[in-house]
Amino acid sequence: MIRPGTSLTKQKQKQRSAAPKVALGKRAEASKPSLDEFLNNCDYVGAVTLLEFERKAREDRKDLLLWLAYSCFHNGEYKKAIDAYDDAMKKDSDPNLHAYKACCYYALTQYQEAEDEANKAPNSPLKTRILFQTAHKRNDESAMMAQHQALSDSKEDQLCLAAIQYLRSHFQEATEIYKRLLVEEREDWALNVYIAFCYYKLDYFDVALEILQTYLTQYPNSITAVNLKACSHYQLYNGKAAEAELKVLQQASSSGNIFQEHDLLQHNLVVFRNGENAIQVLPPLLDIIPEARLNLVIYHLRLNEAMEAYNLIKDLEPSVPREYILKGVVFAALGQQTGSREHLKLAQQLFQLVGASASECDTIPGRQCMASCFFLLRQFEDVLVYLKSIKPYFSNDDDFNWNYGITCAAAGDYKEAREAFLQIQNEKYRAEFSYLSWLTRCYIMSNDAGQAWETYVRMDTSNESFNLLHLIANDCYKMGQFYYACKAFDVLERLDPDPEFWEGKRGAAVGVFQRVVAGKESPDKLQEVVNLLRSSSNPQVEHMINRVMKKWAKENRVKLE
């Protein structure tokens, strides 16, 4: 929920009155608009303008300062409202004005000042509601309990209670209150929006859309309702579908620039457009829209800027699962980048906290968390238990296939790992050395060393290609695929005359010879191995070729040059 007073509340609804009919030749007299007309149309800019004019003209209107404060408050000009209440207090000793002033401080997120001001007011339902809300903001459970007990069954008090339940992520409890109120007053259309918000938070996006339509039928250009509809489409489909839902606001806007005028719409457009303009839009909104901080963290993670993400989230006290998860992801990313075991341990604990909780253990995010927890603990068999349970939901997800492939390979299921890696479509992922090295190992371990060799051949010469060659040589040797091991050790020996590479090449050559003798390898492979051996200057070469291989070839009538 956004706090009251962002520019969301400032939509101007300009109403043009019909021109008065006058006799021919006479000038029409301009009539001053009425305050009631402005307030009925929710045109608080017009109301403020009228009241300030009357104040300067010293016109006599009862409770002018109170109406001015009221209009400023609903226009989001809270400091001006406070000034108006201060002026009113000089003329009127009504102590209830302190409660109205407290509402302004609360809207400015100055919760201590709001509480102090409310305590100056006499006991009233409004005072109770203010103190209930400020106690929640200060995380004062005992004060919240005291104010909760003071709430009545009135509509205002029950709405206040529902708001607290919503803010505490008790969405089901909030829904029950709103539904009860809606039964009592069917035409209170706004209650449908509140219920839709709760279902949205419960991930029932299709239900939220259905309930929201009742309100949109009455108020099709409501920014709050249209925005919620767009967010639901984002969750159900994609950002393009969500942005299309906002076009109705653009068409209804008199300024033609509605997305620049409203904080919430600006924020959500960044999300819908996959982070476009995030650096320009999100930082000024960090203290206004709670999700702005989380989305900026996600933006930095996508750019692999783990330290920037960490600086934004390190002081955040998580209150809902997605905040615990995001903090865990940041700690894991930073720990992997810097080699910090402390941050990896914290990430593992956060994932475990969510995944083991009663409310999340059977959800997809909950199972992802347990998989991440066991992955960081290197318990790959346990990781697979959780990943396999949610695999049908992520068949085309590159991130899932990446993690699933690595886990299968680490657990020894190279065939399954190979299939997972080959399903990855993201070209950036496919170009990373970690992807190529894991896929190469899977090829070798599933007895397809030829594909592993082709992977190396397609690479440009670099340190990474040298490392991949090293992996091919050793893994092929270990798996008894001596032909490709010999080829890999031969290239390594040419690049670096390390005695170990010669020893590997010699052992692989002997392995190929043994397989040819046993009839498990084509004699043509032996000829290639002989050619590879002759490229070495080691004195053992002649003995191996002339005394062993050629002798066997002659005895078995195998052509060997």
Image (cartoon, rainbow, N blue to C red):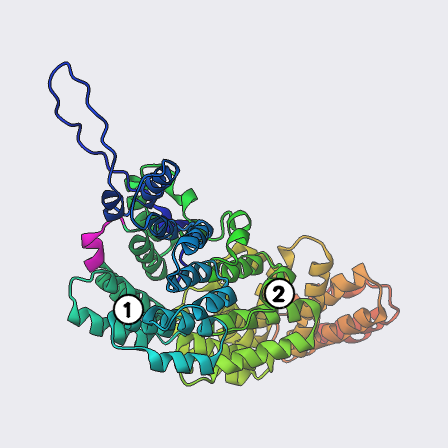
- 80 or 522: nearer the viewer: 80
Amino acid tagged 2: Tyr
Which residues, given as a range, are shown in magenta? 214-221
Q: Secondary structure under badge 1? A: helix
Q: Is residue 517 visible?
A: yes
Question: Residue 339, labelled with which disc?
Answer: none
Q: Residues within 10 Å of mark 2 (few under 14, many from 20)?
A: some
Picture quadrant of residue 255:
top left
Q: Position of residue 475 (x, y in %)?
A: 66, 74
Could you tell me which residue is drawn at 28 percent across and 42 percent down?
Answer: 13
Name the spot of residue 252 as percent of width and height, x first.
28, 41
Name the mark nearer the viewer: 2 or 1: 1
- Judging by the rendered image, the residue that carries numbered circle 2 is 310
> In the visual, does 287 lie left or right of 533?
left
Residue 156 - label: 1
Q: Residues within 10 Å of mark 1 (few under 14, many from 20)?
A: some
Q: Position of residue 186 (x, y in %)?
A: 15, 65
In depth, the one of 325 and 438 nearer the eye is 325
Q: Does residue 20 appear to the left or right of 80 in the view shown? A: left
- Using the image, determine if residue 37 lies above or below residue 293: above
Q: Please identify the quadrant where the C terminus is shown.
A: bottom right
Residue at image x 25%, y 73%? Answer: 154
Q: Is residue 440 magenta?
A: no
* Residue 228 placement (x, y as % from top left): 32, 58
Query: What type of secondary structure mainly makes up the magenta span?
Result: helix
Gap between marks 2 and 1 measured at Cα = 41 Å
